[in-house]
Image (spheres, coloured by chain):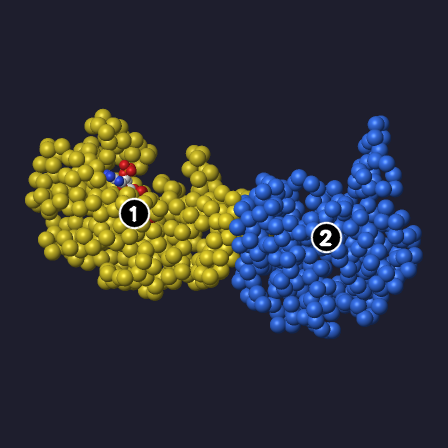
Amino acid sequence: MNPSSSIRIHGIHYTLPERQVGLEQLSAEGRLVSTPETMRDFGFGDCRVSNVPATQLASTTLKALLERHGVDPLEVGLLINASVLPTSSLVPRGESLAEFPTGDNAHLGLFRFSSTRLQDELGLSNARTVGLSELGCVSLSHAVWLAHAVMEMEDLKYALCVNADVFPDGIKREVVYNVCSDSACAVLLSRDPEGLRLKTYHTLTRGYYWDPDGHQNELLAAYFPTGKRVLEKTFKASGLAREEIKLLIPHNVSLRSWEILSKFTGIPLEKIYTENIRPKGHSVAADNWINLKDVIDRGLVKKGDHVMMFSFGLGAHWGCSIVQI
Amino acid sequence: MHLFLTGVTGAVGMEMARWIVRNTPKARVYALIRAPSPVVLKARWSKLAAKLWPDVSARPPEGQFIPVLGDISQPGLGLSPEDAARLASEVTHVIHSAANVELDAPLPEARAANVDGTRHVFEVVRSFRRLERVGYVSTLFVAGKRPGRFLETDAVHASDFVNPYEQSKYEAEHLVRGLMKEMPIAMYRLAYLIGRDDGEVTRYNSMHSLMRLFYQGHVGAFPGTPDSRMDLSSNDYAAAALLTLFLEHYQPGRTFHIGNGDAGLRLQDFIDTMTEVSAESERRWAQGVFLPPDVVDEDTYTLLRRTLLQTQNKQSHEVIRLGDTMYGHLLANQIFDAAPVHALLGERVKPPPAKQLLRDVLRHCVATDWGRNRI
Ligand SMILES: NC(=O)c1ccc[n+]([C@@H]2O[C@H](COP(=O)([O-])OP(=O)(O)OC[C@H]3O[C@@H](n4cnc5c(N)ncnc54)[C@H](OP(=O)(O)O)[C@@H]3O)[C@@H](O)[C@H]2O)c1
């Protein structure tokens, strides 16, 4: 990334649904694949379940972020709505504004895009909108990276990235041995020098793993060696040594996987922020950014510190960034 | 030499038969083969001969090999009275190679074949009136988890075992050592044999299964250090070395190590060679979709193992099952000293370079889809 870039991460805001569902209940509802004991052993506790659709979670979160930072919606030049689940990027039946199309126009329900509705609802009239999908857990990090790149190219004052995902009723909440929560997280980018600096974003996509069920065996074997290499390449690209990283901020996949990756990479577990896994669960693409906000708010990092954010998205994408506080 | 040979249909036995035909044309071999009837015995022998010497002109002359119906799991080997009498009066040399080499066979099963079977063989051998020499075939892995350099003179240890097979072979060695007072016996401990010098695999074993899972991208990590050794060798070398030692350097009461010694394949070289050869034919290796497994310490492997066992992932479970029967040796950081045998045999009989052997064996496995297709 351009080392003299003036683009900064200006603010982060997230929403976690109030409702918490325990592992036993998830299991009783048939929403786990493994036993609750295994999931507990892997570091999970309750998961957060939203009563409102993803689009609504995104809207509330973006609105709060804009208000908190006193940003005039008309000054936002770009909105990227990054969703993991295809169902999250559409405005579902039952959402206000318009009746859900029926009869000959039923197919138009597939064109009810969240990003454009968010632009309308939040008054982001000057923002170009982008819906980003098919990136799994790296969706929000990819969105921030893209927004950063677009801001470099265009003279934009602000850009917004948001991820909101809500698991549809009835489908499993365990994804490859991880218990998934609903959530939304929004990131505001600006040119205010006080913000956080995205210094490196290294990604690796291995399209062979596009079929997470059919290729799961190989994926499990490749997961840690690939993760290790991505971390090493990120360090190399950043020119930073391990000791210069204050914290590794993971996404909230199983604690066990971080214990193993810590051993594979030699990064001590104490340096990996895993405290949110049990209480918050794995909010798919939002975790890294939720955790980043939490470590800043809790004073675990100070101005000038470097943190590393790592995530892995089914598909399969590995993403690793270094952010300077 | 009138040789009584057990295990002729096995990986080592077949190579010994070939070597004998090439090098000691005057030897007569009584080959113990199990079969439900004399007719099946004959058929098994004919099939074996056709496999060992596809070129008819290279086959041993009629009468050089005499198949003998018998089963080491039975007292008296289940020999007919005529065969028992004939062996007792004619045999001068014995090599006992038959065994159950399945690494994960339950201990009672392994003991039945390898300890009781060996006892049965020696009870019969005791009756041989012209007996001159006995060779007992063992394994370097009787070292179990005993760390460090393992010498020919090392016998008793208090370490645990990596699998029931080697425990049973350790116990069998103990039995055989006890018999050395009354019979002229030498012991030959072999390395892990993975195929012939040209890469052909005649009997597939656990190492080939692990190589297959590696090739298919299912192996994520090995425990140990990059320098942990895998003493892999070829069937031809094992047979040639064993028979040369047996015929030219015989010393009753002595144990010989037949392997690579300090030149044993390093774990990292195993991984690198597997990766390199896999990439020749498998695009996922060539394109970096599959990555070479990492070498991790015991703690890391233990955690990974426990985690994978908590998944519903069949292939991961299979990798772990195989690893459980082998990886203990990587962790024990062992070197099986083979300097005395290398010094005795010099340039005449040398182990094949392990990396090249591994390369050729993997290529053979890929070409035949691990023995499913003929080439
Ligand atoms: N292969 C290795 O990597 C390796 C390494 C170190 C030491 N060794 C030792 O080398 C020797 C030969 O091993 P291998 O690799 O040739 O094994 P193998 O390929 O599995 O062959 C085993 C041989 O033993 C015979 N056998 C098994 N049970 C028998 C019974 N109850 N009665 C009669 N014959 C029986 C088998 O006959 P069937 O054809 O009827 O099954 C076969 O001929 C063994 O003592 C083993 O411990 C082998």
The residue labelled by disc 1 is B107
2 and 1 marks in contact (CB < 8 Å): no
Tell whether B67 sits left or right of A123: left
Identity, as a three-letter code, of the amino acid under mark 1: Leu
Q: Callout 2: helix, strand or loop?
A: loop
Quarter of the C terminus of chain A within the rendering: bottom right
Quarter of the N terminus of chain A within the rendering: bottom right
Is residue A86 in view from this perspective?
A: yes
Q: Ligand 1: does it lie within 8 Å of the C-beta at label 1?
A: no
Q: Callout 1: helix, strand or loop?
A: helix
Dot 2 falls on which chain? A
Q: CA distance from mark 2 to mark 1?
A: 55 Å
The residue labelled by disc 2 is A17
The residue sitting at 64% across, 60% down in the picture is: A276
Rendering colour (chain B): yellow
Ligand 1 sits in which quadrant? top left
Quarter where residue B37 is shown = top left
Picture coordinates of residue A146, whole percent (x, y): 78, 55
Tell whether B140 sits left or right of A86: left
Picture coordinates of residue B276, whole percent (x, y): 52, 51
Picture coordinates of residue A177, whole percent (x, y): 58, 49
Rendering colour (chain A): blue
Nearest the eye: B349 or B161: B161
Identity, as a three-letter code, of the amino acid under mark 2: Pro
